[in-house]
Amino acid sequence: MFGTQAQREISNGFSPSSPRHTTTTNNNNNKRSSLSSTKVTAFLSVKFQDLYGFAVEGNIDDVNVLNEVRERVREQGKVWWALEASKGANWYLRPQISSITEGITVASLKPSVLADTIALKRLVRKGIPPVLRPKVWLSASGAVKKRSTVPESYYDDLIGAIDGKDTPATRQIDHDLPRTFPCHPWLDTPEGQASLRRVLVGYSFRDSDVGYCQGLNYVAALLLLVMKTEEDAFWMLAVLLENVLVNDCYTDNLSGCHVEQRVFRDLLAKKCPRIAAHLEAMAFDVSLITTEWFLCLFSKSLPSETTMRVWDVLFNEGAKVLFRVALAIFKMKEEELLRAHQIGDVINILQQTTHHLYDPDELLTVAFDKIGSMTTNTITKQRKKQEPAVMAEIDQRLRRLNSLKG
């Protein structure tokens, strides 16, 4: 079985490479050489690795957008470095407004702390420099505090204790490992899969109620790529499942996930009534698309660099961000969706949209500026409203299964 290497830095061995341009064959080879550059881009396919080692294939426009985004990230990085120079390297490690639930009110926060909290929120929405992500995520999410409640050797002891153990969770994890981003240059190696396995198996023993649920493999894989060490990735997974997301999202009956889907349908009806009515008339169940968005936290749908920007805000502001981002995707394609009259066309529009969303600023601007008010309290009330119906459905399903067995 795999040895414990909790603090080992993950050496991914990849870096962004120069785009490789390949011209797609055109049936008409006699096109005039005076084709405009706009038309030429339609015939060009570009393949390269993104910042996290994933293979990207798109057209020249996609690459130009990605390069513009990276330049904005570099410029944003200068703001972070300037704040680190003036406020100190760990200025954002102070108590945040998210600590209100622990008895701290906005009124009781010191002016300097309140100012830092507001500054951090604005900064995070514009993007955290990749090199600072591990430290900021650990702090903003509460993972540092969670880890401080156990002995320093907790992760190593846990991995040592589960060595050689065989459970339904470990068997499902072993089944899913080769299917987790199979073309990634590090994750698709024995070392990468062993590292991911330790994080997933470790958590399945930490919380037997969750154990392991499909979807967590993709989330944990991206956490490993960002956090660089298994132990940090493990604690980010722990705080995500135990504090950031709603309870029972990944338990056997997925009750929390079903609740989220019902809440999202209600929000879609309120925030995008034309789309909701159109899709309802088509008998299209949005959960066909959005369940994967919520379970995988967009990691299988959005480009990885856009996913990271969503996660930047998720770890700082909580699960309401997932609803905002999901609504934004529908909002951005409202007119196209209204013109679609086949379920397959709706699915294709949404999948193509997420696949080519290389500009996270465009997505997040819609999510936070064009959706309207959506507080955590509002979503919490909606969850409580939907929980009885979800539990009744699950109970009815279980009774039906039991009667068939009988």
Image: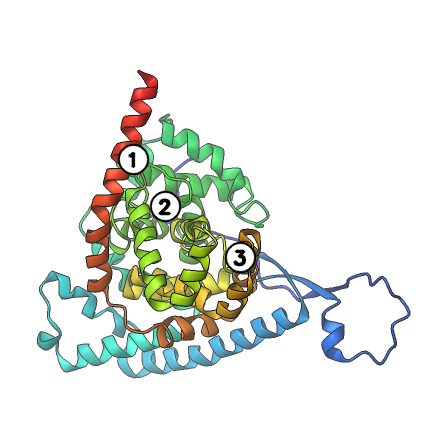
Residue type, mark 1 in image: Phe
- Please say if 235 is above or below 189: below
Residue annotated with mark 2:
6
Q: In this rendering, does residue 207 appear at all?
A: no
Determine whether the residue tagged by mark 3 lies in a helix, strand or loop: helix
Q: Nearer the viewer, mark 2 or mark 1?
A: 1
Marks 1 and 2: in contact by CB < 8 Å? no
Q: Residue flagged by tag 3: what amino acid is it?
A: Val
- 322 sits to left or right of 75: left
Residue at 28% across / 53% down in the picture?
A: 245
- Sequence-earlier tag: 2 or 1: 2
Q: Quadrant of the C terminus?
A: top left
- Toward the viewer: 290 or 210? 290
Distance from Cα at disc 2 to Cα at disc 1: 16 Å
Say which residue appears at 48% left-offset and 54% top-offset: 282
Q: On the rendered image, what quadrant is the N terminus found in?
A: top left
| Side of 30 where 158 appears, left or right | left
- The numbered disc on residue 346 is 3
Q: Are marks 3 and 1 in contact (CB under 8 Å)?
A: no
Pinpoint residue 174: horizontal percent, then vertical percent.
46, 33
First in sequence, mark 2 or 3: give its number: 2
Identify the residue under disc 1. 205
Cβ atoms under marks 2 and 3 closer than 8 Å? no
Q: Residue at image x 24%, y 44%?
A: 389
Q: Residue 208, percent across and down?
A: 27, 35
For image coordinates 89% across by 66% down, the residue present is 29
Tell me how far mark 3 sits from mark 1, CA to CA: 40 Å
